[in-house]
């Protein structure tokens, strides 16, 4: 399988950590992708021009990170997503909330990247920042427990992105999540191995 990736994408990181936890990392070749380069072939693989995109051995390409992680979990025997309906819904809801942190954080970053200072909307940034704050409060009140699942991987990658792009400002008000992330990193080596460095 081939994974089109950017080393700074938290969604790619989620897929890579999941693949490692599932014992599938050695079956996936990484193909560097520049989504900001109009000549990059990613648009021919994923019409949205986004990573991650996973091309299977039969040539089928699947995207986005949620779909890829669910596929990898299925071929590995279902270790990250519970089979029982309510437990599955809880895990997938946790993943959705963690991905929401990423979505809102990336929108804040893009506002700064793609708009000149005079054209930036403080109201828009505040709205996204509020989403992140509310989601972090939910996780702080009840940090994930139990075996590593997809929700935990998604949360760890969201917190890692906040460390990477927002200088870890979240840490000051969330001691429970800080402790949780340290414990997660200790038991999932792939988390540290996939940390962005650019």
Image (cartoon, helix red, strand yellow):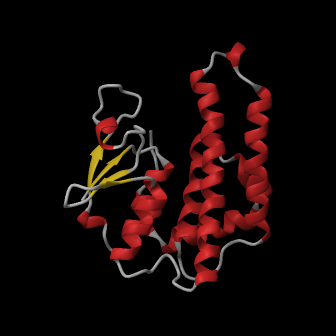
Above or below for 90 versus 14 = below
Tell me residue 164's x, y (percent).
Answer: 56, 45
Tell me residue 102's x, y (percent).
Answer: 60, 49
User: In front: 37, or 189?
Assistant: 37
Tell me residue 65's x, y (percent).
Answer: 46, 56
* Residue drawn at (78%, 39%) of the image: 127
* Residue drawn at (40%, 73%) of the image: 73
* Residue drawn at (63%, 26%) of the image: 112
Can residue 77 be seen here? The reply is yes
Q: Quadrant of residue 19?
A: bottom left
Above or below for 80 versus 113 = below
Where's the N terminus, which quadrant? bottom left
- Left/right placement of residue 110 relative to residue 64 reads right
Tell me residue 186's x, y (percent).
Answer: 52, 71
Q: Quadrant of residue 109?
A: top right
Can residue 167 be seen here? The reply is no
- Left/right placement of residue 162 relative to residue 118 reads left
Q: Check the image and name the residue furthest to the left.
A: 58
User: In front: 29, or 169?
Assistant: 29
Q: Check the image and name the residue furthest to the bottom.
A: 84
Where's the C terminus, which quadrant? top left
């Amino acid at each position: 399988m081939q994974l089109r990736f950017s080393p700074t994408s938290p969604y790619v990181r989620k897929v890579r950590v999941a693949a490692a936890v599932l014992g599938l990392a050695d079956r996936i070749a990484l193909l560097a992708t520049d989504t900001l380069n109009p000549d990059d072939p990613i648009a021919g693989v994923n019409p949205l021009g986004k990573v991650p995109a996973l091309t299977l051995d039969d040539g089928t390409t699947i995207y986005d990170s949620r779909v890829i992680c669910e596929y990898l979990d299925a071929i590995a025997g279902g270790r990250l997503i519970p089979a029982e309906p309510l437990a599955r819904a809880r895990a997938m809801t946790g993943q959705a909330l963690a991905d929401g942190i990423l979505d809102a954080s990336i929108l804040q970053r893009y506002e700064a990247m793609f708009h000149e200072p005079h054209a930036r909307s403080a109201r828009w940034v505040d709205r996204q920042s509020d989403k992140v704050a509310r989601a972090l409060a939910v996780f702080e009140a009840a940090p994930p427990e139990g075996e590593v699942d997809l929700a935990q991987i998604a949360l760890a990658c969201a917190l890692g992105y906040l460390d990477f792009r927002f200088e870890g400002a979240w840490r000051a008000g969330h001691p429970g999540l800080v402790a949780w992330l340290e414990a997660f990193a200790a038991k999932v080596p792939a988390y540290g191995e996939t940390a962005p460095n650019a």
